[in-house]
Amino acid sequence: MATIGWKLDRGERAELLARFPTRWPDQDADHVTLASDVEEDAPLPRAISGEIVGHVDDGDGLEAMVVRIDGETRRPDGSTYHITWSLDRKRGRQAIESNQVIAQRGWRPLDDPVPIRIVPARLD
């Protein structure tokens, strides 16, 4: 089984990290997941741009950016498009926890959405 979604454009990633400094020691800022546990030959998504529209930090070692793709923040599975921005692995935090944090705490919208370039990819 595979995971598909989008990688952040590598040329833009450094600019985004400078604009939004990470709070926790382990930077992630790598990708947006569309779907997990899909067939290995599942087609890649088509979108190549999105917007960072929100932020969440649980204050306990996990920070994520909420992303809007094709006008939606909700993934087909009902969770939220996001980029795990930073985490504290020494506290036992894992990137997979981001959706749970967003669902439990909600997220704070940014004053102005930030356009981002994303590259369709297999994320395994």
Image (cartoon, grey):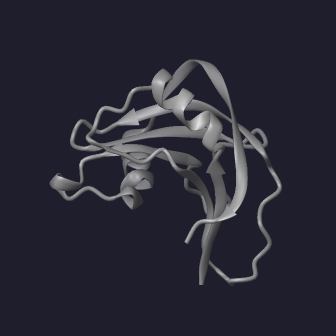
Residue lying farthest to the top in this orientation: 111
In the image, residue 42 above or below residue 22: below
Which residue is at a point 32% across and 59% down the rendered structure image?
A: 94
Q: Position of residue 26 (x, y in %)?
A: 31, 46
Question: In the depicted view, which residue is nearer to us: 78 or 6?
Answer: 6
Q: Position of residue 106 (x, y in %)?
A: 43, 38
Which residue is at a point 26% across and 41% down the rendered structure image?
A: 25
Residue lying farthest to the front in this orientation: 11
Please indicate whether residue 81 sits to the left or right of residue 26 in the image: right
The image quarter in which residue 20 lies:
top left
- Which image quadrant: the N terminus? bottom right
Please indicate whether residue 75 sits to the left or right of residue 62 in the image: right
Question: In the depicted view, which residue is nearer to us: 18 or 104?
Answer: 18
Question: In the depicted view, which residue is nearer to us: 69 or 124?
Answer: 124
In the image, residue 43 above or below residue 22: below
Please count the marks in the image. 0
Q: Position of residue 35 (x, y in %)?
A: 63, 67
In the image, residue 75 above or below residue 107: below
Which residue is at a point 57% across and 52% down the rendered structure image?
A: 31
Residue lying farthest to the left in this orientation: 91
Please indicate whether residue 19 sits to the left or right of residue 49 in the image: left
Residue lying farthest to the right in this orientation: 46
Please indicate whether residue 84 sits to the left or right of residue 13 in the image: left
Q: Position of residue 43 (x, y in %)?
A: 80, 72
